[in-house]
Amino acid sequence: MAGFFNRMYYGDPRKPDLRPEDMPDNRFKLFFTVLRVRIWKLIQLNLLYAIFWIPSFALLYIQSTVTQQTGEPLSILFFLLLTPCLMIAGPATAGVTYVIRDWSRDEHAWLFSDFKDAWKVNWKESLLIMLINALALLIFYINVNFYRQMIVEKWGFMLLYYFILIMGFIYLMMNMFLFPMLITYKLKVRQIFKNAFIFTIAELPRNIFIFAISAGIFLLSASYILSIPAFILGMTLPMLVFISYTNWVFDKYLNKAKEDEVQN
């Protein structure tokens, strides 16, 4: 058992960090190489990150139990309680994103110290982003319920109903870019949301594919709320997937534009 915990903390000595000459020639190969080298660190980071999601998971579990027993829909009180729970996870998400961002580019990052530093630098913006996410979730829920009821009276509302569903899905995909941009670039929160929307629309087919993979991994690991797989690798593995992808998007749009500006 001592060897197991040593590998969890220090990594596997048989799988050292990559050297420049060992670097894969594309991000797809790099993803699997990083996953192989960093697997124990990802598990350790997942256990740390899961702590900050306990309030949200616990509230969802309680609400799902109440809904099954009473059949009552979600109330405004649920969203009021969910908002601070999501905000608790905000700064931690910035810290985890920073560490995984560096690992996904095969750059060095200390798990605890870099997590803490990214937390301290981005905690205000992280809280605001999570607050906006909570408000967006509430608005989405109210609109979906309203137009679903109106469809019964007038079929014309079906278009608005599906429009709200599509916009909600687009907003979910935008979240793949929010925190990677926050910890990578000096942007205001409104600029982060604006760029996230542009990237989501500009790379829509790829975004749908990457989002489906990331969401699928999370849902399979969290098929039961507070399940053990979700606490082992159910959050950091999906994040490694879409952060590796956002690195490519940033290289294509932001970093290339910045390089051209410097050269000119």
Image (tube, helix red, strand yellow):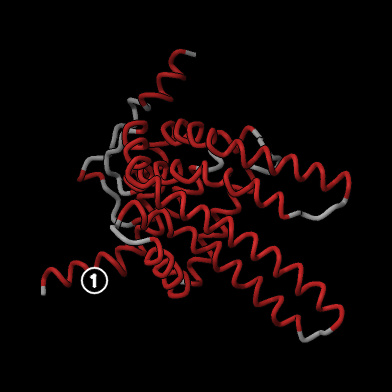
Residue 71 percent coordinates (x, y):
87, 51
Provide residue 116's location: percent of width, then percent of height.
Answer: 36, 35
* Closer to the camera in the image, 151 or 261: 151
Q: Is residue 16 left or right of residue 58?
A: left
Q: What is the crowding at mark 1: few (fewer than 14 residues within 10 Å), some, or many (at least 20)?
A: few
Quadrant of residue 73 within the rendered picture: bottom right
Q: Position of residue 202 (x, y in %)?
A: 43, 75
Q: Amino acid at mark 1?
A: Ala
Left or right of 159 on screen, residue 209: left
Give the residue drawn at x 58%, y 62%: 136
Q: For the point 44% across and 31% down, which residue is it? A: 40
Q: Quadrant of the C terminus?
A: bottom left
Residue projecting furthest to the top: 2
Say which element carries label 1.
Answer: helix
Q: Quadrant of residue 159?
A: bottom right
235 is higher (above) or lower (below) than 132: above
Horizontal and vertical percent position of residue 175: 49, 59
In this figure, what is the number of numbered marks?
1
| Residue pointed to by mark 1 | 257
Q: Quadrant of residue 248?
A: bottom left
Front residue (pair 90, 202): 90
Residue drawn at 70 percent across, 49 percent down: 78
Residue lying at 71% horizontally and 65% vertically, measured from the top left: 142
User: Does 40 appear above or below 236?
Assistant: above
